[in-house]
Amino acid sequence: MSLSEQPGLLFVIATLLPLASFVALLLLGATRWFLRGYAKDSPGVDSAYQFLGGAVPGVGPAYCALAAIVLAFICCAVGFALFVSEVGEMHELEHKLFHAHAKHDDHGKGKDQHDDHDHGKEKGKHDDHEKKKDDHANHGKQEEKDVAKSEKEAKEQREKDRGRYNELVHHWEGSIVWARVNSSSVPDSDRASILTLGFRID
């Protein structure tokens, strides 16, 4: 995963930066507190103690925490701008795919009803209308070709839209497996044998 492929990671970084700053300052304070008791007896320990801030650490930790907050804000601002630039297209594609699927189902039902109706009409015609029937059959074949072509183009467009929609969704969600209780070669299926950690921006 990279920021170019998944800009949603900017929000993950924004979440982790203040936490990382807090943990770093906590460990720094604990180390300084530990060295404080030995600083008077050892020049080397005292040097390390003074390097970490000594008895009065000053404004260094405050600047560290402030820098983490500022960087987190920048990550959020950039992530928000990128998300806003894509969310409109993502919702539009979702709406388009939903209606295309519904229209495709309705068209299939309507075609079946139309075929049954035409079949009933053809049975009632007399022999003196053979020419008209042939014309009608040729016209029907042409219509079938046009419909087939139209359906093919619509299917290709749906696949294209689906690919673009999945690409946009992938930008703003992701997960990793961080715990597993069976072999990685065994599909998880419905066993619920893995734990994932991830994010989703919507």
Image (cartoon, rainbow, N blue to C red):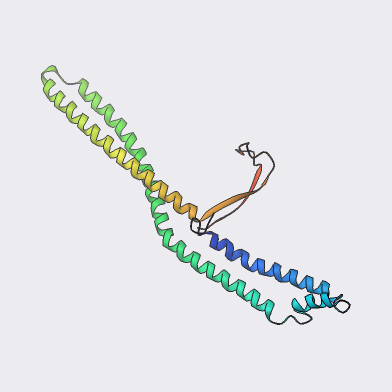
Relative placement, left or right, of 2 versus 121 is right
61 versus 5 height, above or below: below
Q: Position of residue 137 (x, y in %)?
A: 18, 26
Residue drawn at x 44%, y 63% is 84
Residue drawn at x 64%, y 40% is 184
Q: Position of residue 38 (x, y in %)?
A: 87, 75
Relative placement, left or right, of 145 versus 1 is left
Identify which residue, 149 or 94, lies in the foreground.
149
- Can you tell which quarter of the image residue 72 is in? bottom right
Identify which residue, 202 or 60, lies in the foreground.
60
Q: Quadrant of the N terminus?
A: bottom right
Q: Position of residue 57 (x, y in %)?
A: 74, 80
Find the residue positioned furthest to the right.
41
Find the residue positioned furthest to the top.
127
122 versus 70 height, above or below: above
Identify which residue, 198 or 147, lies in the foreground.
198
Residue drawn at x 17%, y 28% is 138
Residue drawn at x 69%, y 69% is 22
Relative placement, left or right, of 87 versus 139 is right
Number of numbered labels in the structure image: 0
Q: Position of residue 130 (x, y in %)?
A: 13, 20
88 versus 56 height, above or below: above
Relative placement, left or right, of 159 versus 202 is left
